[in-house]
Image (cartoon, coloured by chain):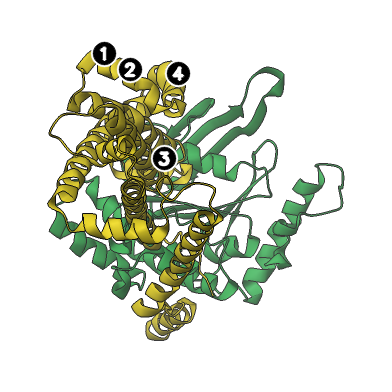
Chain colours: A green, B yellow
Amino acid sequence: MTAPLTEQAGGRTDGQQPAVRLQAVSKTYGQGKASLLALDNVALDVAPGEFVCLLGASGCGKSTLLSLVAGLDAPSAGRIDVDRRRIALMFQEPALFPWLTVSANVEMALRAKGLGKRERRDRAAEYLEIVHLGGFGRKRPHELSGGMRQRVSLARALAQDADVLLMDEPFGALDAMTRDLLHDELERIWRERDLAVLFVTHNVREAVRLGDRVVLLSSRPGRVVEDFPVTLPRPRRTDSAEVAEQAGEITQRLRQEVMRHGAAPNRVPREAAPDAR
Amino acid sequence: MAADTHARQIAGLDALELAPARRAGLLTRAWAGTWPVALAVALVLAAWQLVVLAGWWPEYVFAGPVTTLTELGHRLGEAEFYQALTVTMRRAVVGFALAIAVGLVVGALVSRIRPLRRAVGSLITGLQTMPSIAWFPLAILLFGLSESAILFVVVLGAAPSVANGLITGVDYTPPILLRAGHMLGFRRLTLYRHVILPASLPSFLAGLKQGWAFAWRSLMAGELLVIIANRPSLGEQLHFARELADSPGLLATMIVILVIGILVDRLFGLADNALRRRWGLHQVTA
């Protein structure tokens, strides 16, 4: 699936091949009159080691976009260049296998790589250590809290040893404190492992807290509206004034986008408001 | 933030989030499981005695609990009873094992191959609803009064439930787990083996439980109809007790059949509970 990327490299990638490249990608569901255009002519590059947050209100096709990049679904038009063997996806839910222990869940990522049992177990322990769950390998997923399960899920994704990590609102269901801690963790892991991250969220502050860039998508159909570089020094804090300020700008733009839609033009969906979380 | 404080914060949150394990002691649980059963048995025995006392039937047609249980006690001391029990249980185990094998193969094929599903999917459910005793005339024609005739019907009775359990389990594999498996690099057969089959285990277990009930019923019907010389069995004892108008013996055998059915069902219940506990599907009762 490593499509030729010869002469087209460019843009933000500074001559380097992008880790993910979407060109004129559209996705339509259904056919004829009942068809729904979910994504319209989306172009997006993610450089190796870059952290890109995809932001949008409901219905902007954020998750659809990730599914396309992950290869779980095929685009209706356009092309996506990414090495599918070097890609991991973390879902909104932990999506752990309930019949396996925590350690065995992580080992599943290594099983497909054909490692031996012993090595799988040792490697799984290392990855669990990275997410601070070293002592929990023998537990079952249901014995852990939501935040811990999501960390197991992260460990499993990391265990795939991918270059690109796709994350679909992975911390959406967590409480604020746990989420803050996981932001710090994710940032550390991203730096240490030099990952390219494509992180989907509807939380503007979360996007500014984490991203090198925040890419704003419009809703129905999803289009790239604007690409905001975030140059604030790291580590950032979600509750800092700088993050709040930039989040405010982006929210303003998001409001305009949302207002173009629908019956209640002055109302911003709760989830898109900066102070909603 | 220093890395150390960070790790400690995480550890603190984790400790707070984890519910302390609470599970009653073995004795308490055993007692909680025993007394309702004991009460139910006592109620049944009392009702039985009342019916006998009412005198609708003479005592030699419908024996009372005391006579019957005494007879049962006698039988439990005789070698003949254990011979019959052995024969019946061997048939049950062999038949059920065969049914599982057939059900597994059929279920696996039907759940994976779409045209096959359309062709035989509803046929399996149809077979499930067919009373197994309706198969015996054909079975006796095909195999004569033999072990094979009984096995044939037992397998036909139980296999559809087993197959259906597996098919349902495969159908209801949570899509998110399929996607997760796909992302981890599992495809087709490996996805089936590592994700779909384990995910369908609870449903498969339910199919086994139902299959056992059908197998046991079919077996009793079979043993009543297909009586093989010098091969004593529970069904045969039932048959001869009626022929000889041995009411206590008949009722005693019925109790044995009932108890075996309940015990095996309990075993499946235990397996199901253990599975639910492992998977975290059990209801947390305060």
Q: Which of the chains bears the disc numbered 4? A: B
Q: Earlier in the sequence, mark 4 or mark 3?
A: 4
At a point 28% along the width and 62% down the height, the residue shown is A103
Q: Nearer the viewer, residue A36 or B72?
A: B72
Q: Nearer the viewer, mark 1 or mark 3?
A: 1
Q: SS for tag 1? A: helix
Query: Residue A212, percent across and down?
Result: 51, 59
- Checking the image for residue B141, the label placed there is 1
Q: Are marks 2 and 1 in contact (CB under 8 Å)?
A: yes
Most foreground residue, A20 or A134 = A134
| Labels 4, 3: one chain | yes
Please give the chain letter of the residue carrying mark 2.
B
Distance from label 4 to label 3 (Cα)? 17 Å
In the rendered image, the vertical position of residue B161 relative to residue A121, given as above or below: above
Q: Looking at the picture, does residue A149 appear above or below residue B243?
A: below
As drawn, the residue found furthest toward the top would be B141
- Verify CB contact (< 8 Å) between mark 4 and mark 3: no
Q: Nearer the viewer, residue B253 or A120?
A: B253
Determine contact: label 1, label 4, CB under 8 Å: no
User: Which mark is drawn over residue B118?
Assistant: 4
Name which residue type carries label 1: Leu
- Chain at tag 3: B
Location of mark 2 (residue): B137
Q: Which residue is mark 3?
A: B169
Q: Amino acid at mark 4?
A: Arg
Please state which amino acid type lies under the numbered disc 2.
Answer: Pro
